[in-house]
Image (cartoon, rainbow, N blue to C red):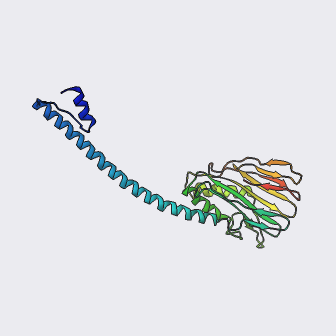
């Protein structure tokens, strides 16, 4: 019962110490306490085992999801089928680099006529699979070369293909997003039609960053009129604004 002996017993690994003479009531109480400790240790060990099994399953699911997302990233990149084209009097270069595996970004262009091309940059709200799926849907609206395949084109009664007003395209996409897709996501967009012969570009800015123009002499200008994002307000309207590019000028649509 000496304090030094008790301390030595605990130091060498004892969990409890009961000196003689032993009191039956205290002895039973200490046994019950030890039983509780052993029970808690067993319960903790079982919970750790179950947690490790759950973590193993989660890691397996994560690895499978990660592989799917990597494949989805490749599919999303394939939406930009052509990264560069030289039209003679103008060159178009595209870059698509999501911050994650997949995202809601899309860039592209489509020929309209020998001297007209359409350019677009789209950013769907959010990051992840839902945004990427909406982006794929948007890509389908600009992928074709005919008026029934490309929302940016229209066909007159003689069958001649021409560009639809960018502001009208924005209004149509707004209707589609609100009435057909039933999603909480929205998107911003810059859509432009460029005349490669005259340098005139007609653009609608729909909540997207302003375009940056670098003049041939090096001067930097911002161009835009603002405008609402697409998919927020039914019946929203947008306006077209005109940019004139001279030989040697560059325009960056973010």
Observer-nearest of 60 and 92: 60
Observer-nearest of 120 and 229: 120
> Could you tell me residue 228's position as x and y percent?
68, 48
Observer-nearest of 28 and 222: 28
Q: Residue at x 75, y 62 (%)?
A: 93
- Picture quarter containing residue 249? bottom right
Dividing the image into 4 quarters, which one contains the N terminus?
Answer: top left
Q: Residue at x 80, y 64 (%)?
A: 91
Q: Residue at x 47, y 60 (%)?
A: 63
Q: Is residue 50 left or right of residue 168?
A: left
Total numbered labels placed on residues in the image: 0
> Could you tell me residue 55's position as x and y percent?
40, 54
Q: Is residue 8 left or right of residue 100?
A: left
* Residue found at the far bottom of this picture: 158
Tell me: residue 90, above or below residue 240. below
Observer-nearest of 234 and 227: 227
> Could you tell me residue 221's position as x and y percent?
82, 48
> Could you tell me residue 12's position as x and y percent?
26, 38
Q: Residue at x 83, y 62 (%)?
A: 195
Tell me: residue 94, above or below residue 47. below
């Amino acid at each position: 019962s000496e304090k030094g002996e008790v301390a030595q017993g605990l130091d060498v690994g004892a969990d409890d110490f009961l000196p003689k003479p032993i009191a039956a009531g205290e002895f039973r109480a200490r046994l019950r306490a030890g039983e509780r400790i052993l029970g808690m240790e067993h319960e903790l060990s079982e919970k750790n085992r179950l947690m490790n099994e759950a973590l193993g399953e989660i890691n397996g699911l994560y690895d499978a999801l990660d592989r799917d997302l990597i494949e989805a990233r490749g599919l999303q990149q394939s939406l930009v089928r052509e990264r560069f084209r030289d039209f003679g009097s103008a060159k178009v270069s595209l870059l698509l680099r999501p911050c994650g595996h997949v995202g809601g970004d899309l860039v592209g262009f489509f020929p309209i006529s020998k001297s007209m091309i359409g350019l677009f940059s789209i950013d769907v709200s959010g990051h992840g699979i839902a945004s990427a799926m909406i982006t794929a849907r948007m890509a389908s609206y600009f992928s074709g070369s005919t008026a029934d395949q490309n929302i940016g084109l229209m066909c007159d009664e003689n069958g001649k293909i021409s560009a639809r007003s960018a502001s009208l395209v924005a209004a149509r996409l707004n209707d589609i997003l609100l009435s057909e897709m039933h999603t909480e996501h929205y998107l911003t967009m810059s859509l432009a039609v460029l005349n490669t012969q005259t340098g005139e570009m007609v653009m609608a800015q729909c909540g997207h960053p302003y375009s940056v123009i670098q003049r041939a002499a090096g001067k930097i200008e911002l161009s835009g009129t603002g405008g609402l994002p697409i998919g927020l307000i039914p019946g929203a309207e947008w306006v077209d604004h005109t940019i004139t590019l001279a030989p040697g000028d560059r325009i960056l649509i973010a």
